[in-house]
Image: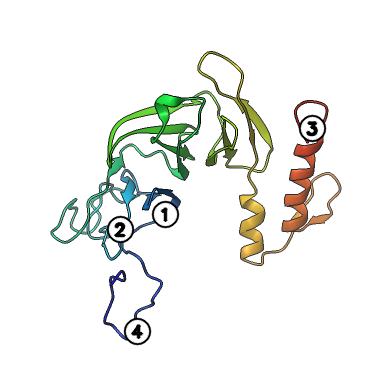
Amino acid sequence: EDNPFVGRASALPEIWSLGHRNIQGAAMRGDQLWTIEHGTRGGDELNLTEAGQNYGWPIIAYGIEYRGGPINEGITAREGLEQPAYYGDPVIGPGGMVFYDGAMFPGWRGDALASGLRDKQLVRLVMDGDRVIGEERLLTDLGERIRDVAVASEPAAAETPGDDRPQDRELTQDGPALRLWMIDASAYIFRAYHALPPLTRKSDGLPVGAVQGYCNMLWKLIRDMKGEDGP
């Protein structure tokens, strides 16, 4: 009964919902599944994703075609199709998301944090129950595509940029105190998943496989942390 195609002999049993364009992040809040996805030109969506529901793509959308013009009929609502909990226009190009439950920023608890690839920002979505009632842009001077965001076990948050360089950033209410170590291996993971040839290392022209490249990045991060607050 959770499957939107229940009763069809050819239906895949693992299907939960449909009508999503390009989901980039997902997070649980209690027993609720929330997802965030890319729109086209406009129309990034945050959805409370429930079993058996249709979230509309490509019949309804809040964006337009990349080349301009409406998507199909150019409508944003139709009976039987779910509305997003929130949509972005202009878009942020979201990556991952998380619901904040840390201790450093008590006013954020229960709010959604979404990484921004296009606008190179961290976006806080202020929640009131299942509604978004406010939006705050953070790390606006970072200048890096943020791929993902996570809340650490200590009172901190950690992010990853959308390239392959380990970095750290600090974020506090009053000044530097919270260190964010950021690392992203999306290029290596993409190549491994699609069985693409190894990358070529610029320093000596030798090939670097996906696993080796990712491990090298982690080793550099650990090495740079030695003598500070690293392991």
Label 4 to label 2: alpha-carbon separation: 22 Å
Task: Provide residue 145's location: percent of width, then percent of height.
Answer: 54, 37
Q: Which residue is mark 3?
A: 224
> Seen in the image, is 55 located left or right of residue 156?
left
The amino acid type of the residue labelled 3 equals Asp
| Residue in the image at 79% along x and 43% along y | 219
| Residue in the image at 39% along x and 48% along y | 30
Label annotation for residue 50: 2
| Residue in the image at 37% along x and 70% along y | 15
**Residue lying at the far right of the rendered structure:** 204
Return the residue nearer the eye: 204 or 11. Answer: 11
Label 1 to label 2: alpha-carbon separation: 14 Å
Label 3 to label 4: alpha-carbon separation: 53 Å
> Seen in the image, is 154 located left or right of residue 49?
right
Quadrant of the rendered image containing residue 79: bottom left
| Comparing labels 1 and 2, the label whose residue is closer to the camera | 2
Q: Secondary structure at mark 4?
A: loop
Tell me how many marks there are. Answer: 4
Label 4 to label 1: alpha-carbon separation: 24 Å
Depicted 83 relative to depicted 80: above or below:
above
Label annotation for residue 23: 1
Marks 1 and 3 close (CB-CB < 8 Å): no
Marks 4 and 1 close (CB-CB < 8 Å): no
